[in-house]
Amino acid sequence: MSIDLHTHSFASDGTDSPAALMRAARQAGLDIVALTDHDTTSGWAQAMTALPDGLTLVPGAEISCALGGISLHLLAYLFDPDDEPLRAELDLAFDDRVPRAQEIVRLLAAAGHPISWQDVLDQTEPDATVGRPHIADALVRLGVVPDRSAAFAGLLHDNSPFYVRHYAVDPVLAVRLVRAAGGVPVFAHPGAATRGRTVGDDVIAALAEAGLAGLEVDHRDNPPETREHLRGLARELGLLVTGASDFHGAGKPNRLGENTTTRDVYDALLAQATGVGVVAA
């Protein structure tokens, strides 16, 4: 059984509609896929109604968090989308994305890069929320960079002078909110140092104490030596170990199913959920 628990549609920063993502997941040989758009559940309904035969959907989200100036992401599965405290935090982060993107474009243009807000909108699907990936697509279209990866490695990197912070919840609070909403929280790509600074083991231990369920160890942005360290830490803290693609469609090289989660870990995650259930075709 092939299980991928981290994907994005154009409800956040992917390039595929939720429906197209479900079809692509099945075509890629997946049996179970989680839809985890950034700070939103807006893609759930379309994904649920477009499930091809043989595919099971795990509704989720990827929650923007920050601690001490370090950005980190929390995958949340099977939580109640109508839980008011969690919904309030998701909305704060989601609603801050457009003003943030506009400020990034303003800074880029002021530095002489040939980009306008309309250029960004031209690269954005009608139902999508504008974010950094769409700025990257505009930069590619304008010939400033060759692809999205180059944009995020340079002009849009977290250490770039054009980086603009956006609202992000404290990760310990996020873990507690997800649990209170009946969901299951997993720390996304905790060793992804190429994205910027990462938190130490002490923070992961604090998250575990707050209710963290697992670590996304098998992810292309976690180097091999870091994966081994994270596996040991997961054993020490009693956390589950997951793997996933972090698929974004055409915008990134990540391919569906390139990293997966084992069936026993998937079953253990489901056993902890009391919010909503999985959806099968």
Image (cartoon, helix red, strand yellow):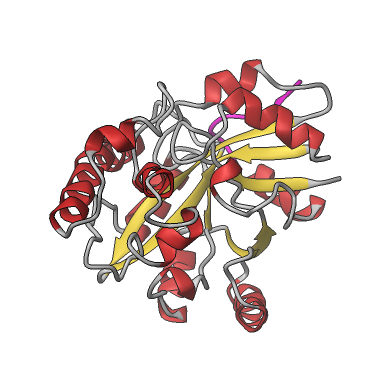
Q: Residue at x 41, y 58 (%)?
A: 151
Residue with the most extreme top position: 49
Residue with the most extreme left position: 110
Compared with residue 18, is residue 120 higher up or lower down, i.e. above or below?
below
Picture coordinates of residue 251, whole percent (x, y): 53, 46
- Looking at the rendered image, the quarter that the C terminus falls into is top right
Count the marks: how many?
0
Compared with residue 5, is residue 94 higher up or lower down, i.e. above or below?
above
Examine the rendering and report whether any part of residue 278 can be seen.
Answer: no
Residue with the most extreme right position: 1
Q: Residue at x 26, y 32 (%)?
A: 118
From which residue to which does the magenta span run?
Answer: 273-281
Picture coordinates of residue 134, whole percent (x, y): 39, 41
In the rendered structure, does residue 29 fall within the stretch colored magenta?
no
Picture coordinates of residue 279, whole percent (x, y): 68, 25
Which image quarter: residue 48?
Answer: top right
In the image: residue 243, left or right of residue 233: right
Which image quarter: residue 181?
Answer: top left
- Looking at the rendered image, the quarter that the N terminus falls into is top right
Q: Residue at x 67, y 79 (%)?
A: 224
Of residues 115 and 133, which is closer to you in this image?
A: 115
Q: Residue at x 80, y 34 (%)?
A: 27
Of residues 152 and 26, which is closer to you in this image?
A: 152
Give the overall secondary structure of the magenta segment: loop
In the image: residue 257, left or right of residue 184: right
Of residues 67 and 131, which is closer to you in this image?
A: 131
